[in-house]
Image (tube, grey):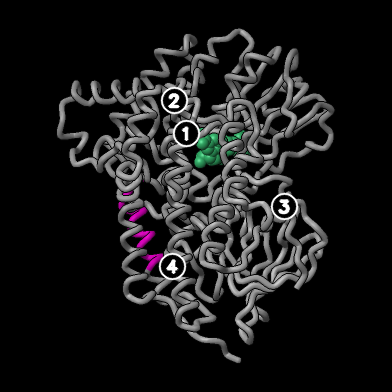
Amino acid sequence: MTDTRSPTGVASAARDQRLDVAIVGGGLAGLYALHRMRGLGMTARVFEAGNGVGGTWFWNRYPGARCDIESLEYSYAFADDLQQEWTWPERYATQPQILAYINHVAERFDLMRDVQLDTRITSAEFDRGSDLWTVRSNRGDVVSARFCVMATGNLSTPRVPDFKGLETFRGKWYHSGMWPTQGVDFTGQRVGVIGTGSSGIQMIPLIARQAKHLHVFQRTANFSLPAQNRPMEAEREAAYKANYPDRRAEARGSGFGVSGYPLPTQSALEVTAEERRRKYEELWQRGGSIGFLSCYNDFLVDEDANATAAEFVREKIRGIVRDPAVAELLAPSDHPIGTKRLCLDTGYYETYNRDNVTLVDVRSAPIEAITERGVRTAEREYDLDAIAFATGFDAMTGALREIDIRVAGGEALAEVWAAGPRTYLGLSVAGFPNLFLITGPGSPGVKSQMILSIEQHVDWIAGLLDHARGHAITRIEADAEAQDRWVAHVNEVADSTLYPVANSWYVGANIPGKPRVFMPYVAGVGVYRAKCDEVAASGYRGFHLTGTQD
Ligand code: N01
């Protein structure tokens, strides 16, 4: 075995390594997995494609990138001294602030000596004879590991649509998820932003302030709520810190993994229109999306209940945007509110009142090509110096499908998932032993405070690996029938809500040809945690646990 550890995380010429756990991805999930596995006394190593850790927060450096969950919540809970000592300067941290936090965590827990940067894992093959994975990288690493943890992220495969002529564009183009490290100065430029999801909605107000002129190419209007971001209030921070363990415990039992939002018990249709309005106004002023998502128990299940909030937000848009035709285009009408990821903004709708901003409806006149000069729609050509694609990601399955993951002689995971992902608990895949997914499809991950869900998965996996070690188990494999039952349950829960109605990345709708399957588990993180804990308490029901075949 070659010792490839380096204090800086700079990849050395690693060739043959033998590990207990290979961890793919150096974001929030991979780093915590490394910390936990080390805590079990296991040898573990993170392989990260970027030249720094941080995952999402390493790559998404576009102007305005910031978290849409309050940072006192969106932070690791595993170390009390960390959460007590760290200070968040604003209610919602910016990308540089979150990246600084992640780097601090990596340093504080001495993680970098087992992180190999600039290393993209290209394949992972399991051998049923030895119960070992062989993981290979683009740099020639060959890693033998008992277990493989895929901390590859859900929104880590950026997607630029297959527009004709992109290569002919004479200006510069960028994607939100691959933004240049040194940033981009749009001063004096004619800029086009394509896409109005969370990324577009965050970058548009900031680019508008720099650009000479900004054209926003919108195919589908999205609901966006005000973040009401502000500097962190000392009293609020102190109150949180005095109560952190209770706050975290409450979050773990909640719907979306955020404390302060008890599960709703009242129907929106039980109360008067005036009372509803008061509530929505209060939530609008408070800021954030979780309040809306948790305000009434039928918000996400009953169209009429949902329509009351959708209309409230549309009225707000009409009240902010001065040009009624632009306001109408910005007012979403094709999906129930909350069934696509609710966006949070700072001054998004107000931006359309600026003289240097033009909204282009590419639903009625689609983009036909990128040309030398800019963007050509079915109606006309727009001259641009720069294009920012905020067109999203091959979500939830993209990163996994890019790695050739298979059991020797068997089909690749990408082939097995050709009709859509199937997992047991969103953690494990039948037919792929000793492989674990962090916040994978079939788990609440993307529908929750991600760090909480990451910690829950990593802790649960750590418990299972500890159990395996104590019982001389070398192979852990999800049972195919248990997986079928779990997939049926995930679908049943989704179908009892309005979520599947929307053409969102939750169903893969943004990727032409991707099978339409609603991927997250939406019964809530508290319910999900209880189910995972029951599985563990039963001796890991639904898993085959066996010793080595040798
Ligand atoms: O991507 P998206 P995103 N022609 O897929 C449009 C997380 N996130 O990067 O809706 C024209 O939501 C597409 O239009 P349509 C968060 O979970 C979090 O914005 O398909 N337009 C849509 O408007 C979020 O949900 C944070 O019709 C095209 C946009 O591009 C997730 O990441 C910040 C097109 C893509 O929206 C993804 O968000 C940022 C085409 N051919 C992201 N193809 C925070 O924490 C696509 N579009 C705050």
Query: Where residue 354 appears, x then y in whole percent?
Result: 57, 9
Q: Earlier in the sequence, mark 4 or mark 3?
A: 3
Residue indicated by mark 1 = 68
Tag nearer the camera, 3 or 2: 3
Say which residue appears at 56% left-offset and 69% top-offset: 435
Q: Earlier in the sequence, mark 4 or mark 2?
A: 2
Q: Earlier in the sequence, mark 3 or mark 2?
A: 3
Q: How many C-alpha atoms fall within 10 Å of the one at disc 3: few (<14), some, or many (≥20)?
A: few
Say which residue appears at 43% left-offset and 38% top-offset: 84
| Residue at the far bottom in the pictured view | 550
The stretch in magenta equals: 486-498
* Amino acid residing under circle 4: Gly
Q: Earlier in the sequence, mark 2 or mark 1?
A: 1
Instruction: Give the Cα separation between the discs numbered 4 and 2.
Output: 37 Å
Is the distance from the Cβ of mark 2 to the nearest ligand 1 atom less than 8 Å? no
Q: In the image, ligand 1 is in what quadrant?
A: top right
Residue indicated by mark 4 = 463
Instruction: Give the Cα separation between the discs numbered 2 and 1.
Output: 7 Å
